[in-house]
Amino acid sequence: METTPEKHDELMSVVQGLNHMNTIMMGMALSKTSAPISRLDPFTTPFLDIKAKMVKKIFSDNPRLYAEILCNNPNMAKIIEIYEQMISKIGSAILSGDAEGLTELLQKTSNSLWPPEKGE
């Protein structure tokens, strides 16, 4: 696939940047709870198990690699801005007990990511 360096960096800010930043955020948040991953084993789900393995990979394999990916992509400021906006929206709905509002946000996002086919 041919692309420009600028377009590559823009796409990699999502493919790698958002993905790795999200995994790092999860690991850092987990480290601040009273339930380290090892204590969660008896209660874990297959999905959490997959995510925990991703967290472990980033924090134990080569953290410098992931730090370089995040710190050297010129498009990460936009990704961080979007991430902060989404945390704020989700957090507000959760803290106010607005399950209906959160459901609407999830549905709207789903429709944006995977628009319904005509006739559905």
Image: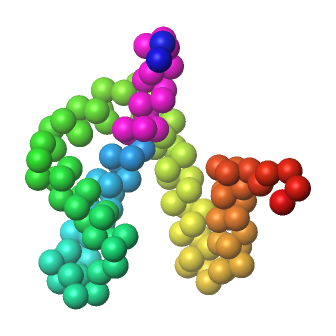
Q: Is residue 15 above or below residue 103?
A: above
Q: Is residue 79 left or right of residue 116?
A: left
Looking at the magenta stretch, what is its main secondary structure?
A: helix
Q: Is residue 80 above or below residue 51?
A: above
Task: Provide residue 82's location: percent of width, then percent of height.
Answer: 54, 46
Colouring scheme applied when the structure was drawn: rainbow
Farthest residue in the front direction?
A: 119
Q: Is residue 18 above or below residue 87?
A: above
Residue 99 seen: yes
Q: Is residue 10 left or right of residue 92?
A: left
Count how many numbered circles sit on residues in the image: 0
**Which residue is more in the foreground, 113 or 76?**
113
Q: Which residues are magenta?
A: 3-17
Task: Provide residue 13's location: percent of width, then percent of height.
Answer: 43, 33
Task: Provide residue 107's location: percent of width, then percent of height.
Answer: 70, 64
Residue in view at x 66 percent, y 56 percent = 109
Farthest residue in the right direction?
A: 119
Asked if residue 96 is among those painted magenta in the image, a careful observer would answer no
**Which residue is more in the foreground, 41 or 70?**
41
Task: Provide residue 84's location: percent of width, then percent of height.
Answer: 50, 52
Residue in view at x 21 percent, y 69 percent = 31
Residue in view at x 11 percent, y 52 percent = 60
Q: Is residue 96 left or right of residue 50?
A: right
Q: Is residue 60 left or right of residue 50?
A: left
Residue 6 seen: no
Asked if residue 6 is among those painted magenta in the image, a careful observer would answer yes
Residue in view at x 43 percent, y 13 percent = 5
Q: Quadrant of the C terminus?
A: bottom right
